[in-house]
Image (cartoon, grey):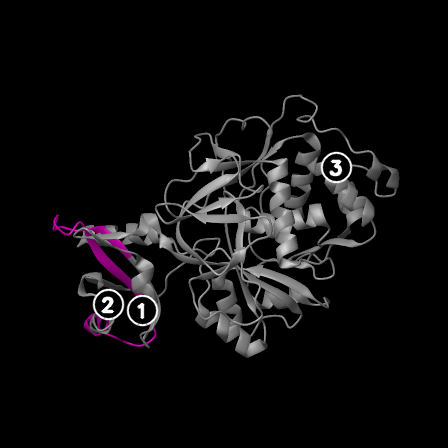
Amino acid sequence: MLYERWRQIASERRDQLALRDAASGRRWTFGELFAAADGAPVSDPARLHSAKVPRRCAGLPSKLAFPQGHSSDFILALLAAWREGAVVCPLEPGQPPPQVPEPPGSCIHLKSTSATTGAARMAAFTTEQLTADAENIVATMGLRADWPNLAVISMAHSYGFSNLVLPLVLHGIPLILAPSPLPEALRRAAEGESALTLPAVPAMWRAWQEADAIPAKVRLAISAGAPLSVELETKVFQSCGLKLHNFYGSTECGGIAYDGSETPRTDPACAGSPLRNVSLGVSAAGCLVVKSHAVGETYWPEPQPTLGLGQFQTSDLAELNDGLVFLRGRSSDQINVAGRKVLPFTIEQVLVQHPSVTACLVFGVPDHDAGRTDLPVACVVAATQVKAEDLRQFLLARLPAWQVPRDWWFVPSLSANHVGKVSRAEWRRRYSKKRQAV
């Protein structure tokens, strides 16, 4: 079904631009891209109307395919896999193929979870679920064929696959491949375009804003993969009049919420409104529950009750008010201080208001005093020299004393992973290692 849909798109848009590689300057029309993936000469338009029958659909043995990297080869490998009926599992550059059995039933796609809150695992998807996610995103965000997607984020990650790859091959939204997210590379990739859509992560938006490198041709700006600060959103809006649209999703279910407003948010916890055809609720434990046709089939190879039957129970604590989603942190991140629970977000949103604090991350580690259970730790990036005692007093004036961190760790920066997420679990591990070495 996916290859048939691609064949239809390629036929309808045969002579229109589909893909441009900014590094090499090479361009493909939809007809040329179809021919390159199908192995037929582009001069044979009849080939566009006679796609091969995928082996999986025909009941024949399938295989696993691993599109990899950030080039046209990724797209060609994906289309070839669809044509042959292979199960697709996208990989980051240099990532070794996972050793997993073929997924069950009609599942044709595997996604690796980000593993920011635990061990990595795969989520399996059917054709219908991938198609639904792409349709929800295109309809909600208003992606347009005359506003090509500028690709700087990973196409293998769920965000890039759903916002860049699927809109290209299932909806005919052209794609421009930038060789890197560096400011100068971004500027060169945008040259010659009259209008662009640019999905990115907050770390990229911050770097581009500071370098004054956001292309003037960007008409739709999307930020996902990590929390978008109101401060950054406002700076971009004030400097170039561009609204950063906050997008919240998950590997297991695709897009969840999107901020479609035209002015900056005032509440950093606001993730926007549910995507079209996505229904949201909150569990008894306060966690967000997602229902839609885009929700994955199962975790693989070890199914879990939190995913399946069109429903995904996240670990994100949330509130639903007036049609908007407000995220309050992850249930797994709660810090237990002598039986009282506090979310890191509660402390972080106050601490970052200190004029010397540019970024911070709060987490709990096992306390040497068993009666306290967790030791709250603040990992801080400071713009100017500031003492831990000054920050402690700042928080004491605004929070209950038991919520104030007991230890402070000043670092040059809070490095993010390849998809722009700052992993609380990783920084907790680094702190624990540093603590043990003392």
What is the secondary structure assignment of the residue under circle 2?
Answer: loop
Disc 2 from disc 1: Cα separation: 8 Å
Q: Residue at x 29, y 50 (%)?
A: 429
Q: Is residue 45 magenta?
A: no
- Please state, as top left, top right, bottom left or bottom right, where the N terminus lies in the image: top right
**Quick check: 263 left or right of 373?**
right
Check the image and report above or below for 50 versus 171.
Answer: above
Q: Are marks 3 and 2 in contact (CB under 8 Å)?
A: no
The three-letter code of the residue at mark 2 reads Leu
What is the secondary structure assignment of the residue under circle 3?
Answer: helix
**Quick check: 242 left or right of 360?**
right
* Position of residue 372 measured from the top left corner of the image (x, y, whole percent): 15, 52
What is the secondary structure assignment of the residue under circle 1?
Answer: helix
The three-letter code of the residue at mark 1 reads Val
Query: Between tags 3 and 2, which lies in front?
Result: 2
Per the image, the residue denoted by label 3 is 4
* Position of residue 183 measured from the top left corner of the image (x, y, whole percent): 56, 68
Check the image and report above or below for 311 versus 344.
Answer: above
Q: Residue at x 53, y 58 (%)?
A: 273
Q: Are marks 2 and 1 in contact (CB under 8 Å)?
A: yes
Q: Which mark is residue 399?
A: 2
Per the image, the residue denoted by label 1 is 350
The three-letter code of the residue at mark 3 reads Glu
- Please state, as top left, top right, bottom left or bottom right, where the C terminus lies in the image: bottom left
Q: Which residues are magenta?
A: 363-392
Q: Residue at x 41, y 44 (%)?
A: 115
Disc 3 from disc 2: Cα separation: 58 Å
Check the image and report above or below for 205 versus 168.
Answer: below
Q: Tell me the crowding category of disc 3: few under 14, some 14 to 19, or many 20 or more residues within 10 angstroms, Cα based.
A: some
Disc 3 from disc 1: Cα separation: 52 Å
* Residue 331 seen anywhere in this rendered image of the structure: yes
